[in-house]
Amino acid sequence: MRRLLAQPSAAAALAVVVALVSLALAAPLIAWAVGTSPTEFHSDAVDPALGGLPRGVAGGISSRHWLGVEPVSGRDILARVVYGARVSLLIAVLATAMSLVLGTALGLAAGFFGGWTDAVIGRLMDLLMSFPSLIFMIALISAAPGVNRQLLLVVVLGFFGWPYVGRIVRGQAMVLARGEFVAAARVLGASRRALLVREVLPNLTGPVLVVATMSIPSYIATEAGLSFLGVGVVPPTPSWGQMIASAVPWYAADPVYFLVPGAFLFVTVLAFNVLGDAVRDALDPRSKRR
């Protein structure tokens, strides 16, 4: 942690991530403070004579609507953005957790046991990684319209993400399994389970943590892309990608509606990527960044 915070970019990225998580957790409180909800229409905030454009300047920014309102519907952008942060972060964190559990378990088994176990799991990883995952995600999600879309996104993202985690864990486990400390524990009579749980697995914490911090922004961007294409989060549940998609026809007349969710998405992905790079450098003993 000391090495991580010694990097100004990492400290700034961590502060942004903490602020975004705080906004997501405080979404109900923020909506209560502005006196609205993400699904409440405000017809008085838009002008029917102008095709539903927000009244006032900068997309309808006012004391009631701090970031303006959506065209036509008049829904509060701030409420939708903070609830959208909840949705994006929840899906990304759960998908990351699923991919880490599957990838770590299967990668550890493949790297430690080798032989036919490694062959079977390795071919399964190759098979899943050979799929055009985005196209397959779109087809799979579109084929299940009645299923809880957020849960389906978690399962699909986590399922297609675990082979990338498994590849990294497998390589590290192969090196650790041949380490002197594992050989010493084996000579002392440690069982295979003890070797896995007490010797090899704790030494995988660093690589797994790095993969986790790099996976979260990838899943956030993927969820936003799927929602932008109309196969992600279903309205009226707010999503940044969904908001950007609905803002495209209005970007010339009401740029605020387009820029706000886009800026939140950009800053979130950037902050997590910078933090992931910093975590990797902080955990790498060969890194020059001390």
Image (spheres, grey):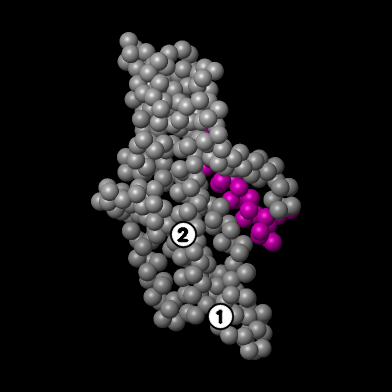
Residue placed under numbered mark 2 in the picture: 98
**Amino acid on which disc 2 is placed:** Met
Q: What stretch of residues is rendered in magenta?
A: 262-290
3D distance between C-alphas at marks 2 and 1: 22 Å
Residue depicted at 29% across the width and 53% down the height: 140
The residue located at (36%, 33%) in the rendering is 245
Which SS class for mark 1?
helix
Res 184 visible: yes
- Occupied quadrant, residue 16: top right
In the depicted view, which residue is nearer to us: 144 or 276? Answer: 144
Above or below 257: residue 23: below
Q: Is the residue marked by circle 2 packed among few (<14), some (14-19), or many (20+) residues within 10 Å?
A: many
Q: Position of residue 126 (x, y in %)?
A: 38, 66
Q: Residue 153 location in percent, x, y?
A: 38, 50
Residue under the point 46% across and 70% down: 106
What type of secondary structure mainly makes up the magenta span? Answer: helix
- Counting other residues with Cα less than 10 Å from the Cα at mark 1, is it few (<14), some (14-19), or many (20 or more)? few
At mark 2, the secondary structure is helix
x%, y% of residue 272?
56, 46
Q: Residue at x 58, y 62 (%)?
A: 207
**Residue denoted by label 1:** 193
Verify whether residue 288 appears in magenta: yes
Residue type beneath disc 1: Arg
Which mark sits nearer the N-terminus, 2 or 1? 2
